[in-house]
Amino acid sequence: MTREQSKAGFDRFIREYPDFSVAVPGNLYGIARRLSLVDWRTYCDTMKVSGLAVKVVKKAPYPLKEVEGLIEVDERLILTSTAARFFSAKLDIRLNQELSGEFDYTIDCTWGRRGLPARIEFEQTLMLLYESRDWKGALTLMDGPLASIYPTEDDNIFTLSTVPHTPCHDITIDVQEKRAKMEKKIRHYLPAFPDLFRYVGVQSSRKTKLLDLSANRACTVYREKNEFKVMSGKIDAIFVAGDEIKCALGL
């Protein structure tokens, strides 16, 4: 469901908001040898069945080890600051205020902060920020408890995240301990990581996740009388929510 919604929304997002994203050149996905939940052949077959265009990469532009295969994927980096400026100029945005007054309808996009008719959890996350003038593109290791290097809106600044260590289940976070574990994870596949990157800080955020073992991140809209509650998944699934709400209102 998540993959299908993202595929349907990708082109529409670019068409309707062309200035909100840029292409990520050299965006590589690598299937980890032995530790991946899906082997290389199965992963490629799944992409083909889904109708997703992939390009098999014979050799990475940097030395990798313990990687069974590589594909290059068309992805785009969301320019959140550009989107924020655009909507701030068009909308009367008021943050950190209680909802008051009478409304015909309300659309709750707070990711469950006002409650959802579904079992959810809030997860604090921590990604590490690095500077590199030599690295280009992105690298995501699949599929399972692995790691990813991804560009940001800032030139030469990249994030490092890992599935086991990015979530912060404890309120007291030892950043340096996290850093050591995350760098060890990525060095297993990219030994030159310490030579390519310089640590510059952290990026913290909070996720709302459905309590679902399938890791479902599809967009769902719940309705309670005159209030719509949106549980968004990937950003391009905003069209799923918008179309469903407009249909319910007869628009």
Image (tube, helix red, strand yellow):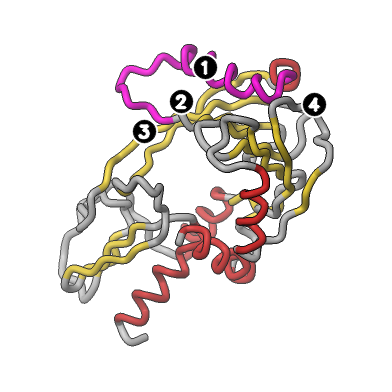
Q: Amino acid under label 4?
A: Pro
Side of 144 where 137 appears, left or right: right
Q: Are marks 2 and 1 in contact (CB under 8 Å)?
A: yes
Please identify, in this view, whether the residue under mark 2 or under mark 4 is nearer the observer.
4
Q: Residue at x 37, y 79 (%)?
A: 246
6 falls in the magenta region? no
> Residue 69: horizontal and vertical position, in percent?
72, 39
Give the residue at mark 4: 63
Bin the neighbour count of mark 4 within 10 Å (Cα to Cα): few under 14, some 14-19, many 20 and up.
Answer: few
Q: CA distance from mark 1 to mark 3?
A: 17 Å
Determine which of the numbered discs, if any, sits on residue 165 in the image: 2
Q: Amino acid under label 3?
A: Gln
Q: Earlier in the sequence, mark 2 or mark 1?
A: 2
Give the residue at mark 3: 124
Q: CA distance from mark 4 to mark 3?
A: 33 Å
Q: Are marks 4 and 3 in contact (CB under 8 Å)?
A: no
Q: Earlier in the sequence, mark 3 or mark 2?
A: 3
